[in-house]
Image (cartoon, helix red, strand yellow):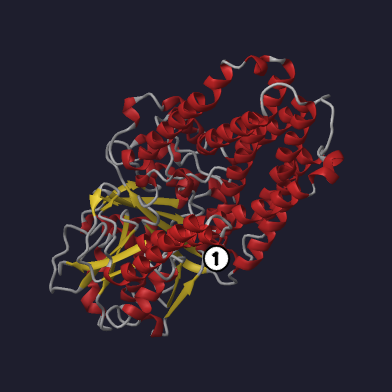
């Protein structure tokens, strides 16, 4: 629905559909007609709202929503908003030496009120976009030219134009958001120079990592500039902060698709007080290079910054003396600051992070977690260790924007735990029967399966989001398959009861087999990856669905202890707590640990069920 209408209208229409469902349900005439009238009213309001926006969002992530833009579009995983930008040439890390010779048309493309890009007006005259050469994000183009370029995240087309301005042989741009691509090529296509019609440009709608993995081409430059910044983290939406571009496995894929002298270049924010993001990129470079057999990673890494933006360049083979001299010369001319080269390190931690032996020590002792993320822990922007949560020094500089969600996560866990204790645990304390042995065992069983189901679901979701390439695919595929599989398991639970012991077996198979399967099939197309995910999920989901109805059947057959309704309540309470707790476990200790906690909870549940007699009704 969100691909066709804006979000407030979708909420109204969904409410109307729900009201019509109540109208269709057999009940007394008065109630039905009230529901039907409400449904018709809401559907009418939704239809009107789509055109005139009587109901709209006024505040977004702590800021006032702008209604004076040129264009707004929602889809299932983002909101994009376009407005005018000033005529002064824009750059993320524009050199202070640059002096604008002319004004230029620009549009500001806002994504989820937390990330942004710029659409530059382009009429085919490359001299009009000369300012792009003065941006620190463009540094790799000075070293490898002419060559083929792959741009990850097309956005407003700035990196595409940069490649053209440098006269690169061919540039391929990969964009995961179809609305951004349509915006650039259709709605504002003429404004941006109809880049899709340029014979030296190829624009692709795909997930970049998967596209690169199945590509048969090698590239002289693979570039990603400030991809995925504050969009999810500043809202506290922790489940959406996985990033498959900033993991060791992803970088190994990128490095293997470079030409022999190719460069992987990425740009991120640089915080003077604590440059954790750039250090983590350097850690990624070091870990990835060592994995492909490089003995001295420092010879392959150059980092240059301009104020609060830094660019890292990772070469497949050591940078030559000419490369290093060129970077030094360009940096001096542009007033950029070299951070790390094979000859120079601005700070001792950058020297350490690129030197085997010192690398491991710095990872252990640095105030934030700057270890190279992996597919098992793909949370590049999450840099807190569990033991650092009470240290005020952790939250400083630009890092506080990335770490803000930790506070939301902690508060959410405290709230759901408190409410569960008040609504479920406290009443049970005053019930004599729940203290009987069998009731306690059943309480443990229902609590354990509630905890386990959400632990496993969130763990599977986290693991397959990286494989599928985007949170929306993870949510739709994982939730749909698990609901379908668990409903089938619930339906067949009475017949399959003797096989319940297969639940931990099926879950263990997923935990230990899925990493290698997903890594081997990263290059597969999206439909194939969806099908593979479904096949991986269904067996464990089937047996997970058996747990609750078997527990209810056993509670009814035993007919002792607390009423069955309390078992529902305990299960629900622990499910809610687990939905937040699972995210905390995943971001601090990894996806595998999350799944193992779920597996352990299921084993505990089966032990608790133990020798209570069965009577399936």
Q: Residue at x 67, y 31 (%)?
A: 564
Q: Can you give x and y, in whole percent of width and height, for residue 47 in the image?
A: 36, 70
Q: Quarter of the image holding residue 444?
A: top right
In the rendered image, is residue 427 in sight?
A: yes
Please name whichever residue, 160 or 590, is drawn nearer the observer in this view of the structure. 590
Q: Can you give x and y, in whole percent of width and height, for residue 198 in the image?
A: 39, 84
423 relative position to 342: left or right: right
Looking at the rendering, in which quadrant would you find the C terminus? top right
Q: Can you give x and y, in whole percent of width and height, for residue 94 in the image?
A: 23, 59
Q: Residue at x 39, y 75 (%)?
A: 182
357 relative position to 142: left or right: right
Q: Examine the rendered structure and indicate whether residue 422 appears above or below residue 583.
A: above
Q: Can you give x and y, in whole percent of width and height, for residue 350 in the image?
A: 39, 40
Q: Quarter of the image holding residue 440?
A: top right
Q: Examine the rendered structure and indicate whether residue 42 appears above or below residue 411.
A: below
Q: Where does label 1 land, which residue? A: 212
Please name whichever residue, 470 or 481, is drawn nearer the observer in this view of the structure. 481
In the rendered image, is residue 470 in sight?
A: no
Residue furthest out toward the front? 29
Please name whichever residue, 531 or 311, is drawn nearer the observer in this view of the structure. 531
357 relative position to 74: left or right: right
Label 1 secondary element: helix
Classify 10 Å Cα crowding around label 1: few (below 14), some (14-19), many (20 and above).
Answer: many
Q: Examine the rendered structure and indicate whether residue 89 appears above or below residue 468.
A: below
Q: Residue at x 60, y 37 (%)?
A: 594
Q: Quarter of the image holding residue 616?
A: top right
């Amino acid at each position: 629905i969100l691909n066709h209408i804006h979000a407030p209208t979708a909420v109204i229409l969904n409410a109307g559909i729900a009201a019509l469902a109540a109208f269709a349900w057999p009940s007394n005439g008065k109630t039905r007609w009230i529901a039907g009238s409400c449904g018709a009213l809401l559907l009418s309001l939704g239809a009107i709202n789509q055109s005139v926006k009587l109901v709209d969002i006024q505040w977004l992530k702590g800021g006032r929503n702008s209604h004076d833009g040129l264009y707004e579009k929602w889809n299932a995983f983002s909101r994009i908003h376009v407005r005018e930008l000033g005529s002064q040439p824009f750059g993320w890390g524009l050199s202070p030496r640059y002096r604008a010779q002319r004004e230029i048309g620009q549009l500001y493309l806002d994504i989820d009120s937390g990330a942004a890009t710029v659409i530059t007006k382009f009429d085919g005259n490359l001299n009009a976009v000369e300012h792009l050469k003065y941006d620190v994000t463009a540094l790799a183009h000075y070293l490898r030219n002419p060559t083929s370029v792959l741009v990850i995240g097309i956005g407003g087309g700035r990196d595409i134009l940069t490649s053209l301005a440098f006269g690169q042989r061919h540039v391929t741009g990969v964009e995961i958001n179809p609305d951004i691509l349509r915006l650039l090529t259709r709605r504002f296509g003429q404004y941006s120079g109809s880049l899709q019609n340029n014979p030296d440009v190829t624009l692709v709608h795909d997930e970049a990592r998967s596209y690169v993995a199945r590509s048969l081409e090698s590239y002289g430059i693979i570039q990603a500039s400030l991809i995925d910044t504050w969009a999810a983290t500043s809202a506290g939406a922790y489940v959406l902060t996985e990033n498959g571009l900033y993991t060791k496995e992803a970088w190994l894929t990128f490095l293997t698709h470079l030409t022999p002298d190719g460069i992987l270049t990425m740009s991120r924010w640089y915080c003077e007080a604590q440059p954790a993001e750039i250090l983590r990129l350097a850690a990624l470079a070091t870990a990835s290079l060592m994995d492909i057999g490089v003995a001295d990673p420092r010879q392959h890494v150059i980092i240059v910054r301009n104020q609060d933006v830094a660019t890292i360049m990772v070469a497949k083979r050591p940078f030559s003396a000419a490369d290093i001299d060129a970077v030094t010369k360009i940096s001096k001319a542009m007033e950029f600051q070299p951070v790390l080269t094979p000859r120079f390190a601005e700070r001792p931690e950058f020297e350490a992070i690129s030197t085997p032996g010192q690398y491991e020590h710095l990872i252990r002792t640095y105030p934030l977690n700057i270890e190279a993320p992996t597919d098992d822990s793909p949370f590049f922007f999450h840099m807190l260790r569990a033991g650092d949560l009470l240290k005020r020094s952790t939250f400083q500089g630009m890092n506080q924007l990335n770490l803000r969600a930790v506070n939301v996560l902690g508060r959410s866990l405290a709230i759901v735990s408190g409410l569960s204790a008040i609504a479920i645990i406290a009443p049970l304390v005053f019930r004599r029967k729940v203290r009987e042995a069998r009731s306690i065992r059943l309480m443990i069983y229902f609590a354990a399966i509630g905890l386990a189901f959400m632990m496993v679901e969130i763990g599977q979701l986290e693991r397959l989001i990286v494989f599928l390439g985007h949170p929306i695919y993870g949510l739709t595929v994982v939730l749909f398959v698990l609901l379908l599989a668990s409903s089938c398991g619930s339906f067949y639970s009475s017949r399959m009861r003797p096989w319940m012991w297969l639940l931990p077996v099926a879950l263990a198979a997923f935990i230990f087999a899925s990493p290698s399967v997903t890594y081997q099939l990263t290059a597969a197309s999206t439909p194939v990856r969806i099908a593979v995910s479904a096949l991986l999920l269904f067996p464990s989901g089937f047996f997970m669905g058996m747990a609750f109805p078997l527990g209810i059947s056993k509670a009814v057959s035993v007919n002792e202890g607390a009423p069955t309704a309390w078992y529902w309540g305990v299960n629900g309470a622990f499910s809610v707590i687990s939905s937040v707790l699972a995210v905390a476990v995943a971001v601090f200790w990894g996806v595998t640990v999350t799944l193992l906690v779920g597996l352990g909870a299921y084993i505990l549940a089966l032990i608790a069920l133990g020798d209570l007699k069965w009577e399936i009704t």
